[in-house]
Image: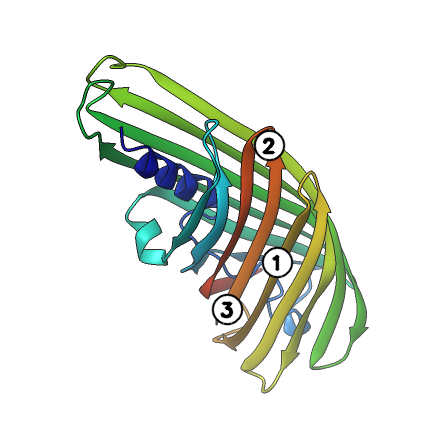
Amino acid sequence: MKICIVRTLAAIGTCLVAGTVKAADIYSPMTPEVQQTTTESGWTFSFAPYFWAAGLSGDVAQFGLPAVDVDASFSDIFDHLEFGAMAIGEARNGPYSIFADVMYTKISGQAGTPRGVLATDVELTSETFAGLLGVGYSVFESGAARLDVVGGLRVWSVESELSFHGGLLDGRSRSDDATWVDGLAGFRGTYSLTPEIYLTGWGLIGAGAADLDWDVAAAIGYRFSDTISAVAGYRALGVDYSDDGFVFDAVQQGPILGLVLRF
């Protein structure tokens, strides 16, 4: 059996946190918050679907196999993608904010075996979920800029299944999964260069069940109207988790493109 192929597919499945790799206005730093319109209650709301063309690199281990080094481009990952969805939401009232970031992906891959005795081919299906819930407080705000201190909890969940077809193991399958929680803290900010063009970015770092969990990004945005903006930039996210043979030590990075809706 081509164990190296199975290990590589498992690695890609585990590392694909945003699996598809989509992202953009995380924690709403890409929202031009300075010019948002408030409701009668004082609250403003934003929602951002996004796309993140990220590659990944690092070490991953599943199914009791030794850790494998992974260095995959975005196109390599996209070839195995079945489904991916990500969304960011934020509610803000004055200097206070509550935000959520949800990412889910499902990928699969199939590889034949050299002799087909134990199995003629092996299929891997991997589902990955990462969700962040946090709060923020503005420590600086002017007519053109805002700087927030933020903190929150990120939940990771990875579940993979190997299915064997043909040979002695035909119809059998094996699964491996891990779920953990990390606490993160950092800053996010927005600065308007002109009424239409603005800069935005964030930096978060933390730990918990993982030894290290971090997320940084920088982007430029354009306001089409009071309710719609577009953003483009670069994001990098990393996590270092290991427990009982399950290893997830990877970095995802690449360009981001998103749409911000405010109401």
Residue position for label 2: 179
Within 10 Å of disc 3 (Cα), the crowding (few <14, some 14-19, many 20+) is: many
Residue 222 lies, in percent from the top left, at: 50, 77
The amino acid at mark 1 is Asp
Is label 2 in a helix, a strand or a loop? strand
From the viewer's perspective, tell me whether residue 160 is left or right of residue 169.
right
| Label 3 sits on residue | 234
Residue 207's place in the image compared with 163, above or below, is below
Please tell me the numbered disc located at residue 215.
Answer: 1
> What residue is at 19 percent from the left and 30 percent from the top?
114
Query: Which tag, 3 or 1, sits closer to the chain's start?
Result: 1
Dot 2 and dot 1 residues touching (CB under 8 Å)? no
| Numbered circle sitting on residue 145 | none
Quadrant of the snapshot with the N terminus: top left
- Does residue 9 appear to the left or right of 207 in the view shown? left
Left or right: 135 with respect to 118?
right
Image vertical order of residue 226 relative to residue 166, above or below: below
Give the CA distance from mark 3 to mark 1: 11 Å
Taking the spot 35% from the left edge, 50% from the top edge, the residue there is: 77
